[in-house]
Image (cartoon, rainbow, N blue to C red):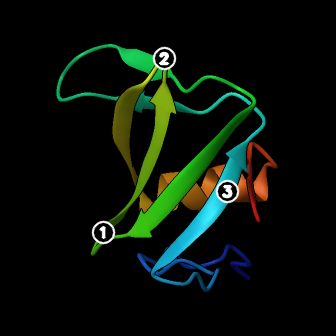
Amino acid sequence: MDRRQPMTTQHSHNYPENFKARVVGIVQHRIGDGQLETIPSPMEVDVSTAIASFVLSWTIEGQPVTVSLAKPDFDYHIDHNNIVVR
């Protein structure tokens, strides 16, 4: 009997369109085909829900920073306590 869970593209969490979160662990993102970059931690971020991703934004030294995480990646970081929704 196969007891593996079926893969799904839907996330298991329900998030509002815009919310706040705190990056508290290692969360990496990739810009295009470039190298992985780590989001500074701890970091308070604003999160916006997009069609297939979450957009995280914050300010460093007065400069705005915006990155996108695919929904499965964002959920992974929530489930592993790297990102905490506030």
Residue at x-position 71% and y-position 26%: 41
Q: Nearer the viewer, residue 76 or 50?
A: 50
Q: Nearer the viewer, residue 26 or 2?
A: 26
Q: Which numbered dot is residue 61?
A: 2
Residue at x-position 55% and y-position 27%: 39
Mark 1, secondary structure of its residue: loop
Residue 47: x percent and y percent? Answer: 50, 60
Q: Which numbered dot is residue 52?
A: 1
Residue closest to the far left? 32
Instruction: Name the residue carrying label 3.
Output: 21
Residue 54: x percent and y percent? Answer: 41, 61
**Disc 2 + disc 3, Cβ < 8 Å:** no
User: Is tag 2's residue or tag 3's residue first in the polypeptide sequence?
Assistant: 3
Of badges 2 and 3, nearer the viewer stands: 2
Q: Is residue 12 above or below residue 24?
A: below
Specify the amino acid type for callout 2.
Glu
Specify the amino acid type for callout 1.
Ala
Quadrant of the drawing holding the C terminus: bottom right
User: Is tag 3's residue or tag 1's residue first in the polypeptide sequence?
Assistant: 3
Would you call the spot at circle 3 few (<14 residues within 10 Å), some (14-19), or many (20 or more)? Answer: some
Answer left or right for 19 relative to 72: right
Quadrant of the drawing holding the N terminus: bottom right
Of badges 3 and 1, nearer the viewer stands: 3
Q: Which numbered dot is residue 38?
A: none
Residue 63: x percent and y percent? Answer: 37, 25
User: Is tag 1's residue or tag 2's residue first in the polypeptide sequence?
Assistant: 1
Q: Is residue 27 above or below residue 1?
A: above
Residue 65: x percent and y percent? Answer: 37, 33
Q: Could you tell me how far apart the alpha carbons at marks 2 and 3 are, in whole angstroms?
A: 19 Å
Mark 3, secondary structure of its residue: strand
Of badges 1 and 2, nearer the viewer stands: 2
